[in-house]
Structure formats: C-alpha cells, structure tokens
Amino acid sequence: MELFTVASSSYSGISLTSRSVYSSSYTVPALTTSISRLKVSKYLGSSVCFRNRYCDLSKEVQRRRSFGVCSTVDDAGIGPVFTEVSKFKDAFWRFLRPHTIRGTTLGSVSLVARALIENPNLIRWSLVLKALSGLLALICGNGYIVGINQIYDVGIDKVNKPYLPIAAGDLSEKSAWFLVLFLAAAGLLIVGWNFGSFITSLYCLGLFLGTIYSVPPFRMKKYPIVAFLIIATVRGFLLNYGVYYATRAALGLPFEWSSPVAFITTFVTVFALVIAITKDLPDVEGDQKFQISTLATKLGVRNISLLGYGMLLLNYIGSILVAIYMPSAFKRNLMIPAHAILALCLTFQAWILNKANYTKDAVSVFYRFIWNLFYAEYLIFPFI
C-alpha cells in the first residue's frame, strides 16, 4: 500500500511522500521508521526512474504527434499544388486536340521512314535528334492553329464542344493566349535553327493560313470552300511535302518526287478535304445558332455525310488502280488488299450511320472513324 501511495503520488506530480513517512513515524518505533525511510528512498528512486521514463515516452508521443501534424500541414500545402498541376495538364492536353496531334505525328514518322527506306545507306544516328526536333516543331504549329481557333470559337464551342478547356472554363483566355504565342514562337525557333529558310517559309505559311482561318477580320472558316482548301493545304500538301523535303535535305539529297510520296501527298490532301467537309457535321446546332455558314448547315447532314463517304470511296478505288497500273512503284500484294479492306470498313460505317438516321451521336462516331482511316493510311504507307 505504501509503495502504491509513493509511486502514484510521484506519477501524479503531487508530493505525498512526506505525509506517508510521517504517518509511519507516529505508529512504529525509530528503528522501524529508519528502515521504512530506507525503503521509501528505494521506492522513491524507482518512482523517479519511472517518472523519467514516462516523461521520455510523453516526449516521444508528443514528437510523433507534432510530426504527424507537420505531415498533415505539408500534405495540405502540397496536395492542392498537385491538383492544380494535374488540372492544367489535362486542360492543356485537350487544348492541343489530341486527335490532330496523332495525325501530325503519324504523318511525320511515316514520311521520314519512307525517305530512310529509299536511302538506307544514308541513315545516321545523328538524324534522330533532328527528326525529333522537327516533330516537336510540327506539334507546336498544330497546337497554335487549333488553339487560336478555340480562342475565337469559344461561344460556338460552348454549344458544340463544351468539353474543350476554354469553353468548359478549365483554361482562361489569358492562359490560352500565352500558350498559343509560346507554341508559335517555339515552333518558329526550332525550325529556323534546324531546317533552313525554305522550310521555315513553309512553316510560316502554315501558321498564316491557320491564323486567317480563325481570326477576324479574315475568319475564312465562314466561307466553306476557302476553309476546305486551307485545311487540305495545311494538313495535306504542306505537311507531306515539307517533311519529305526536310528529310531529304537532312540526308544531303536534293528534293525529288518519288511515286509513293506523290501518291500519299495526293491521297492525304483529298482525305484532308473530306475531313474539312465532315468536321462540321457534329457542329450544325452551334453553327446555326451563331450563323456560321457551312455545307452541313446549307445542304444537310445526310447529304454531306454521303458526299464525304463518296469522296473517300473514290480515293480508295484510285489507290487500288494505282497499284494495279504501277506495279514497279508499289507493292501490290499489300496495297490492294489493304485499301480494299479499308474501303469495306468505310462502307460498313456509312451503313451504320444511315441506320441511325444521322443522329448527332452517330455522326460524331462516323467523323471519328474517318480520322481512324486517316491514321491507318499513314501506318501502311512506309510498307507499300
């Protein structure tokens, strides 16, 4: 009982030891009292040790708790930063319009691969860095063109494409302007530094056409025929001709057309024209609201869908005929069946669109499928 009194008194920080000792002296002889005092001293030493250990334990718990608090504060500070960075990354990616980047990337890689296949003895590892810089410049130019279009089409996009970052409120107009100016400047710097004056002039022409397509007072997208020609020129002719020219120049060769490159440039220019015609199909509602004149608003969704389907089908038939009549320039055993299969897939998708009665969702699926056919052509091009 005495041990419990001393230890518990010491633990609670209240010194009751003296009272316990004094009570002992009233009831026992002096010798007993001395012995008891020795015992008390022993127990006091134990209680001090216990108290010290308790204090150390308390300090450790306190330290860990404070560390946990600091960690929570750090997490609370860092968490929102990561969230904002993640949101900006997502908005920036949507701002670049990924489906157009895929087309640009596949086109560039395909044409470079074709030039290298034609001249395998000139392949050098040093060309890889130059090719990557060229691809980066093209992506910057692509980002500038689609970005500036979103800035001036924000009202229309709120109806037609509310998922785009400016229309959705995920990217401010000020940030969008910074991005498009940065992309244009970066692209021009890369091209001017690596590819000479002629390719730089072609690059500037592409930026200029992309600008007058969207920016008032030109805003050529209001005039359907001019808009189609701009898109076909930039995505068809300039991309294919420019990349092939730059690749041959990097190999130390003068430019000259080869039959496969002439084919892909013609084929893709027609394809880009179809993309330009059909891209307005899902946007009829917003275009009508903002009085944007397109072939889709004038002629109707069904007629433009059939027009796009017919043009692409003729493109595939022409590809098969080219392979038949120019066997020395193309690999017929690949080119003919590949284009026949793609034509059949196109026909099946057009049939599905007709069965769906040309609803907005069905038209959007059809338009995305046209882009997939566009990618497929570039994927098979190096091997035909």
Image (spheres, rainbow, N blue to C red):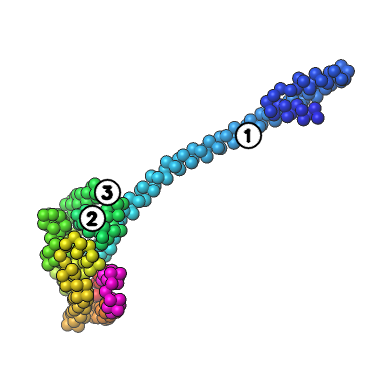
Name the mark on residue 57.
1
Residue type, numbered disc 1: Leu
Q: In this view, does 10 lie to the left or right of 355?
A: right
Picture residue at 28% right of the left edge, 72% below the top: 359
Q: Give the range drawn in magenta.
A: 351-370
Q: What kind of secondary structure does the magenta stretch mostly adopt?
A: helix
Q: In this view, does 265 lie above or below 158?
A: below
Q: Which of marks 1 and 2 precedes in the sequence?
A: 1
Label 3 to label 1, Cα distance in Å? 53 Å
Q: Are marks 2 and 1 in contact (CB under 8 Å)?
A: no
Label 2 to label 3, Cα distance in Å? 11 Å
Query: Which SS class for mark 2?
Result: helix
Question: Residue 121 sits in which quadrant?
Answer: bottom left
Residue that mark 2 sits on: 154
Query: Which SS class for mark 1?
Result: helix
Confirm whether the magenta stretch covers residue 354.
yes
